[in-house]
Amino acid sequence: MLQKKVEFRQRLGLGDIVTFYFDFLKQNFKSYTNIFISYNGIFILAFLGVSYLLVTGFLGFINSEGTSSEIESGLYLGFGGFAFLIIFVIVAALNYSLSSSYLSYYVTNKSIEVDKKVVWKKVSDNIGNIILFVLMLIVIYVAFLIASVILAIIPIIGTFAQYILNFAITSWLGVSFMVMLHEKQSISNSFREGWKLVIKNFWKCIGVNFVLGLLVGVLLLLILSIPGFIIGIYAFHAVDTGVDVGNSAVAKIVWIIAVWVLLIVTTYSQALSQFINGILYFSLHEQTYNEFTRAKIEQIGSEI
């Protein structure tokens, strides 16, 4: 059966964006996952190495029998944590870009088919701006963490303010990134335009990120519950039979795989989160400028 492309370039309410988001995921899940695996393959393997370092270090601390053992375990954890930080930043930037490029191509392409080479070309053509944007993103999130610590001092109201600020910054950065990639704008213009679109539709942006963030989080928790259930059964069996989990090779393998799956799913969820603000961008842009609607009207007029 021929599938109909989901059109985001129209005025959409919160409920419409939620519906369209999941319609888009159902239609593009297989295609995007193939692209995700293709360009993240080496990092997925690297995460396996990170999992080995973290689990080995953690179990080493549990079974440490002296200072030298603790130092060795600390080195494993230190190298694992540092490697995770570096790889995660690279992977986050990559998938932020892939998701945005994928959505940009999907919206402007006449068919629902997405060519992964075209998606990657859009990323590679903008690699300089992407790196600068990510550096700015890091600075902004450091400022956000400082603000969060200050807000944490204020009971109840501070907590709500933290969440609102988090969703607002997520919306602003996501929409700004789409402006940069889709409209080929400079970094400064992208942040300025993203701010303009988000501020004019502030509570819609907060609501979309809250609702979809929650729904995607629940969906990913359901996915993680499968390996979690298997690990739970193994842990129960190990305790019941008196297995020394700290020194068991099987337990170590199980925990390495569990951490590895967790890292992959976390990375994939970050990629899916940018689709939220990408869809939001197209809706807000059309709501503000009516470019797509005017183009359709002009097309109809020329055909009469």
Image (cartoon, grey):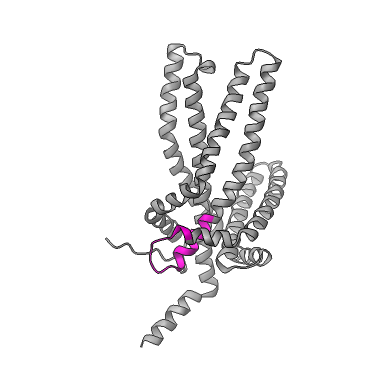
Image quarter of residue 66: top right
Please identify the quarter of the rendering in which residue 84 is found.
Answer: top right
- Residue 202 can be seen in this image: no
179 falls in the magenta region: no
Q: Position of residue 82 (x, y in %)?
A: 66, 36
Give the answer, above or below, for where 51 lies relative to 1. above
Please give the name of the residue rendered at 69% of the width and 21% of the height, measured from the top-left corner. Answer: 71
Image: magenta residue range? 98-117
Percent across and percent down for residue 262 are 50, 36
Q: Is residue 233 left or right of residue 2?
A: right
Q: Nearer the viewer, residue 112 or 39?
A: 39
> Viewed as shown, does residue 135 lie left or right of 107?
right
Pick the quarter of the image with the N terminus: bottom left
Locate residue 39, reporting x and y percent: 50, 49
- What secondary structure predominates along the stretch shown in magenta? helix
Instruction: Say which quarter of the image contains residue 97.
Output: bottom right
Q: Is residue 108 magenta?
A: yes
The residue shown at (50%, 27%) is 255
